[in-house]
Image: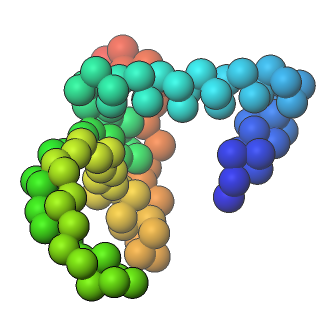
Amino acid sequence: MTKADLIEEVSRVVELTRKESEVIVETIFDSVVESLKTGDKVEIRGFGSFRTRERKGRIGRNPKSGERVEVPPRTIPFFKPSKELRDVVNGGPPPPAQPLNSDSDA
C-alpha cells in the first residue's frame, strides 16, 4: 500500500474528498515525524509504537574498494508492532472491538 492508496482508502471510508483525505493523512504523518524529531515516543494502541534508537559509530568497509570507512553514530526511527497486530498478521483472530464509551454499569 502506498500513501496514495491510503489517501484513497480514507477518502472512500470517511466519504471525504481526496484533497481532504490527503490533508488528514499528511497531518498524521507530519505529527509522527515531528514527535520523533523531538525524541518523543508515538504509541498507537492496537497497532504499535514508534520511537528512536541510537546506533553506535563503527568501522565499515567500502564494498567497491574494500577501504575502511568510519560510520558515524546516528539516530534512527524504530517501529515495534503491538501484540494485536502481530497476531492478526500471523493469521490469528482480529482483536475484539473496544466500545467507544465505557460508561456502562450494567
Can residue 61 be spotted in the picture?
yes
Q: Quadrant of residue 99?
A: top left
Q: Along the horizontal axis of the image, is 82 left or right of 88?
A: left
Residue 88: image quadrant is bottom left
| Colour approach in the figure | rainbow
Residue 15 appears at what percent x and percent y?
Answer: 85, 29
What residue is rendered at 81% in x and 42% in y? 8
Quadrant location of the N terminus in the rendered image? bottom right
Depicted 99 relative to depicted 5: above or below: above
Q: Nearer the viewer, residue 12 or 60?
A: 60
Compared across the picture, whether 23 is left or right of 60 comes to right
Residue at 24% x, 42% y is 75
In the image shown, does 51 or 14 lie closer to the viewer? 51
Measured along the vertical axis of the image, is residue 81 above or below residue 98?
below
From the image, which quarter does the C terminus lie in?
top left
Residue 65: x %, y % from top left:
34, 83
Q: Is residue 49 visible in this depiction of the protein?
A: no
Q: Residue at x 27, y 84 (%)?
A: 66
Q: Nearer the viewer, residue 101 or 13?
A: 13
Tell me if residue 56 comes above or below residue 98 in the rendering: below
Residue 16 picture quarter: top right
Extreme-top residue of the structure: 103
Residue 34 position, x and y percent, is 41, 22
